[in-house]
Amino acid sequence: MDELYMKEALKEAYKAYQINEVPIGAVIVRKGEIVGRGFNQKETLKDATLHAEITAIKDACNKLGGWRLPGCTMYVTLEPCPMCAGAIVNSRIEKLVIGTKDLKTGACGSVLDITNNQHLNHQPEVKFGVLEEECSNILKDFFIQLRKNRKREETMERYPVLEFNLKKLYNNTKIVTRLCEDNGIKVAGIIKGFGGIEEGAEEMAKGGCYQIGSSRIEQLKSLKERGMEVPLLLVRIPMMCEIEDVVKYSDLCLVSEKETLNLLNKEAKNQNKIYGVVLMYDLGDLREGVFSKEELIQLAEYVEYELPNLYLEGVGSNLSCYGSVAPATENLNQLGNAAREIEENLKRKLNIVSGGGTTTLPLMVGGGVPEKINHLRIGEGINNTQDLPLYWDTNIEGLDPDVFILKAQIVELNEKPTHPIGQLMVNAFGDLPHYDDRGIRKRAIVALGNQDLGDSSRIIPKDKDISVLGASSDHTILDIHDSKTEYKLGDIVEFNILYQAMLMTTLSDYIHKKIVK
């Protein structure tokens, strides 16, 4: 009869196995009838007391109407722990039948012997070894499978994933900084485009960047606290609410307002330091900057002579970012001429005459950057080189376009029409896209959307026979009809990313980041 009831206990253990709990089961028998059942549920129900024995005791007490269980026998697949052995003693169970010993925590003779403790007021009869092999095997099988699952979880990559190749970033940085150096230009490496990932900032510094810059003071704070020794440049006009942090965590910033300069000077005095500023001159792009040369010169003299805790590092401008005004020899000459007049008035050289960012690189490669320009703020042209050939017909030898590779998993494959069916209206983003009717074509959906990308048109499939049709916030639809690869559900599609997609994916909590060294 013991084997019969132990098989019932094993059935309970299998219930635990099926919900990924350690498979231990128990039954309580009285006068040939099972009056209590239980299996391990402590992980599922987040309760440390819900071992199989405790659950079976509670079940039996409810059925029999009392906390004492005289005349009852418990069958349990694994030797009870101290808690359960104590509960067995306290409930006055008459006999305990155990499948296999627990040599780590068993409290019925293996490690402790609570059930045979003569100082307690009850000692149940204990019997070991009933269906011992079966009771042991279910535990062994469970832990073998658990280890396999954990190993699979550790090795299985989660998607979507953005791979960030530090070696390629370093090599790109060296190429661009040396090219700029040959033209008399120092480079501030801008890290905002990849979310200020610290390892990337360090590679740009190693690769020859004169400064590291970001528009987010939080990113510079992380670098300062990490111990970065390269000067840190804030490339967004400081907000009044962040002046204290700006002075504390950066070494210089771009400025255009007199009141902001006053606040920076006051805070620099409070922190007992000299803080650097670069005055911005608007050359027509209509973003930040003083709009007249005369005002720029007056502001420079004000910093030099009236603000003792600020140091005028130089002047700079921003082109193409808002107004799409192209950097040109003519407008950069305006910046250079303003710098010369300031130097004449101050009777000293400016350290920085900053002629913009990545969009000035094509002009520099073509020899059109005026000699007075000695500084560029470059991010995209180093860490994501797609735009140089795509938009500006500029190829710099040796630059690797694969610093970032975005990988997404296919979640649906189907053949569908290429034109939506029914009356069209604006989509989820308020747009009314144009659709070409190309008949029935094979397409794939990847688990990646505009919530991750900003705009799905800013990703480029590595498979040149795939085209991006569009996206919702959660899914991107791909035309794979002409691809030579036979894609299957669960396969991975790789993409290069343009600037906007780099901005979005590096900051998204839903895109896994993988640093490749």
Image: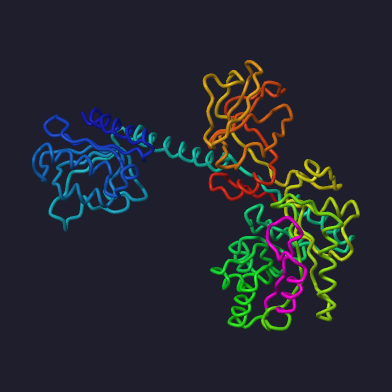
In the rendering, at what x and y percent does residue 445 appear? 58, 29
Residue located at (54% from left, 38% from top): 152
The reply, left or right, for residue 110 in relation to residue 208 is left
Residue located at (76% from left, 49% from top): 168
In the rendering, at what x and y percent does residue 287 appear? 68, 57
Residue 196, placed above or below residue 130? below
The residue closer to the viewer here, 246 or 7, is: 246
Residue located at (37% from left, 50% from top): 104
Q: Which residues are magenta?
A: 275-303
Q: Is residue 208 visible?
A: no
In the rendering, at what x and y percent does residue 188 appear? 75, 62
Q: Is residue 70 magenta?
A: no
The residue closer to the viewer here, 417 or 28, is: 417
Q: Is residue 515 visible?
A: yes
Residue 156, placed above or below residue 261? above
Residue located at (83% from left, 76% from top): 343
In the rendering, at what x and y percent does residue 202 appear? 70, 61
Q: Is residue 298 magenta?
A: yes
Residue 359, placed above or below residue 270? above
The residue closer to the viewer here, 3 or 10, is: 10
**Residue 402 sits in quarter:** top right
The residue closer to the viewer here, 370 or 362, is: 370
Q: Residue furthest left?
A: 65
**Residue 163 sits in quarter:** top right
